[in-house]
Amino acid sequence: MNDLESKILQIIDESPSKVDFNLLKRKLRRSNTTDLNSIKKAILNLISYGTLFYTLQYGQSYIERSLEQPIHVSPHIVIKPERCTVTDPGNCIVISIEKGASFGCGDHPTTRMAIQLMDNYMYRKCGKIASEKTKALDIGTGSGILAIAAAMLGINSVIAVDTDPCSIFEASRNVKINKLDDRVKLSGNRPKPIEREYDLIVANLRTPTLISLCGEIDKIAKRQCLLVFSGMKIEESGSVCESYEKMEFSLVEKRVEKGWSAICLRRG
């Protein structure tokens, strides 16, 4: 991969919104004297490698990252299709996801940001916080990707719940692919509240649902519980934080990408 191709990937990864060809062209030509043909050739090369692909939304085409090969979604986590291999993962955790109808394969900003927050707290800042007694809850698991990430980051027991039977089926398949059957359990109903049970609770859901869960989460979150919430629009994250501050949760970190936000809250 040459310098221009790396620059294109950097622009797409760091952009707060989706990137179309004209935006990419403006950013590249603003920073250097790259000619139009070189930009087109570099994009075609990245598409031929399987690194980028074109998407269509409301009649507008965009250039986005492809998930047909392994991608680094955070410093220590790589997501890949089941059929792909990672020859030298280094110190990275590799998660295999079979893409299906359920949400959460790494192509949406809310999934990536949730994983980045989990990685940032559980791996980089504090090391692996898990022990044999740690438990996590993934509410609205979809493909199971966040539950799988929690287990691979060291949480010993993860409960992943979703009301959609299709999600339960696909999440179960992904859990098996990653050989986590003994540590990640799927359920169509949320567990009954048990006082101070979970060390980590993750949820990639829309704002009204996150706020409505506040009372329930207050009952099941341990004193030092970590919350990772995603699925909010940028302007909505403040209202979610305010709701949980009343339950003694404090904002640890906030991320934004392409109009979406994710937050990490911690009790105590």
Image (cartoon, grey):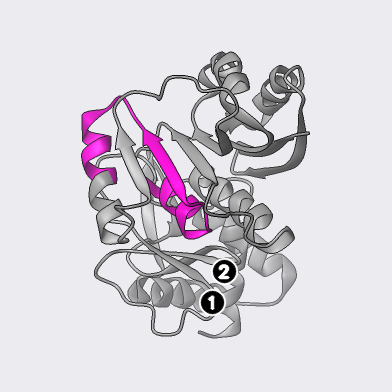
Q: CA distance from mark 2 to mark 1?
A: 5 Å
Q: Position of residue 165 (x, y in %)?
A: 22, 30
- As helix, strand or loop, the secondary structure at mark 1 comes to helix
- Nearer to me, 132 or 33: 132
Which label number is shown at residue 8? 2
Does residue 22 appear left or right of residue 224 in this picture? left
Does residue 145 appear left or right of residue 256 in this picture? left
**Quick check: can you spot residue 244?**
yes
Q: Alpha-carbon neighbours of circle 1 within 10 Å: few (<14), some, or many (≥20)?
A: some
Cβ atoms at labels 2 and 1 below 8 Å apart: yes
- For image coordinates 55% across by 17% down, the residue present is 216
In this rendering, is residue 43 above or below 60? below
Q: Which residue is mark 1?
A: 5
Question: Is residue 134 inside the magenta stretch?
Answer: no
Q: Amino acid at mark 1?
A: Glu
Q: Position of residue 22 (x, y in %)?
A: 55, 55
The quadrant in which the C terminus is found is top right
